[in-house]
């Protein structure tokens, strides 16, 4: 299994880097994990809707270049489906049984995701209605992917 995380923007906070590194290391026994950080577009103060759409389109094009043709793509979006950890673990297992060896997760930048990226997704997933910084969401996602594999193994980690 290969897990790819495509994100917009550079991660600067050391505590988040350390947490992501820890869970990526833990995940290595289950899957090869790759994190791809893409440059974000600078958003001018008081940007118009048209400017925001142009920014999303540029970021979206960069994202799409990194998605493999046979990847199962899960985008994180507020309108996505909310899953309990057990259901998320089952979903990942089902994706693998369906013949996918590459699962790509996508976290957009501060403006979200281009509609074309959402359209490419096989699944839209939400971690709830709360707004979280996209940098923090990386750590939460990597931990939840690790948790999903631990649930599949019947590990007490989840309890």
Image: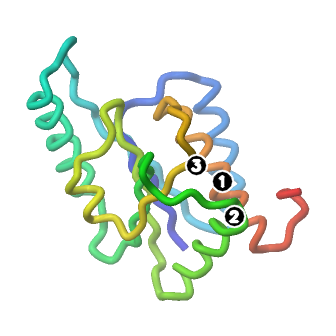
Residue drawn where x is 44% and y is 51% of the image: 76
Count of all numbered marks drawn on residues in the image = 3
Where does the image place residue 63, in percent across and percent down from the top left?
27, 51
Q: In this image, 62 relative to 87: left or right?
A: left
Please, what secondary structure does the residue beneath circle 2 have?
helix
Q: In this image, 65 relative to 121: left or right?
A: left
Q: Which residue is mark 2?
A: 148
Where does the image place residue 40, in percent across and percent down from the top left?
27, 32
Where does the image place residue 19, in percent across and percent down from the top left?
67, 36
Q: Quadrant of residue 26?
A: bottom right
Q: In this image, 147 relative to 49: left or right?
A: right
Residue closest to the far bottom: 98
Q: Name the mark on residue 96.
A: none
Number of other residues with Cα within 10 Å of mark 2, as a class: few under 14, some 14 to 19, many 20 or more: many
Q: Are marks 1 and 3 in contact (CB under 8 Å)?
A: yes
Residue drawn where x is 61% and y is 61% of the image: 83
Q: In this image, 146 relative to 119: left or right?
A: right
Distance from the alpha carbon under mark 3 to that under mark 2: 10 Å
Q: Is residue 113 above or below residue 32?
A: above
Distance from the alpha carbon under mark 1 to that under mark 2: 6 Å
Q: Are marks 1 and 2 in contact (CB under 8 Å)?
A: yes
Residue closest to the far top: 45
Q: Is residue 90 above or below residue 113?
A: below
Q: Which residue is mark 3?
A: 141
Number of other residues with Cα within 10 Å of mark 3, as a class: few under 14, some 14 to 19, many 20 or more: some
Where does the image place residue 78, in percent across and percent down from the top left?
44, 46
Q: Which residue is mark 1?
A: 144
Please, what secondary structure does the residue beneath circle 3 have?
helix
Q: Are marks 3 and 2 in contact (CB under 8 Å)?
A: no
């Amino acid at each position: 299994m290969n897990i790819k995380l495509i994100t917009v923007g550079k991660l600067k906070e050391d505590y988040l880097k350390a947490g992501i590194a820890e869970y990526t290391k833990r995940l290595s026994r289950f899957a090869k994990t790759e994190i791809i950080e893409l440059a974000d577009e600078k958003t001018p103060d008081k940007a118009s809707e048209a400017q925001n759409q142009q920014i999303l389109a540029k970021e979206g094009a960069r994202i799409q270049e990194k998605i493999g043709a046979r990847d199962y793509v899960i985008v994180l979006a507020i309108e996505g489906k909310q899953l309990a950890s057990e259901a998320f673990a089952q979903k990942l297992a089902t994706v693998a049984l369906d013949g996918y060896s590459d699962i790509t997760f996508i976290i957009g930048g501060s403006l979200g995701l281009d509609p074309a990226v959402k359209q490419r997704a096989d699944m839209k997933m939400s971690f709830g209605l709360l707004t979280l910084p996209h940098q923090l969401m990386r750590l939460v996602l990597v931990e939840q992917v690790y948790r999903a594999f631990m649930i599949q193994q019947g590990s007490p980690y989840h309890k």
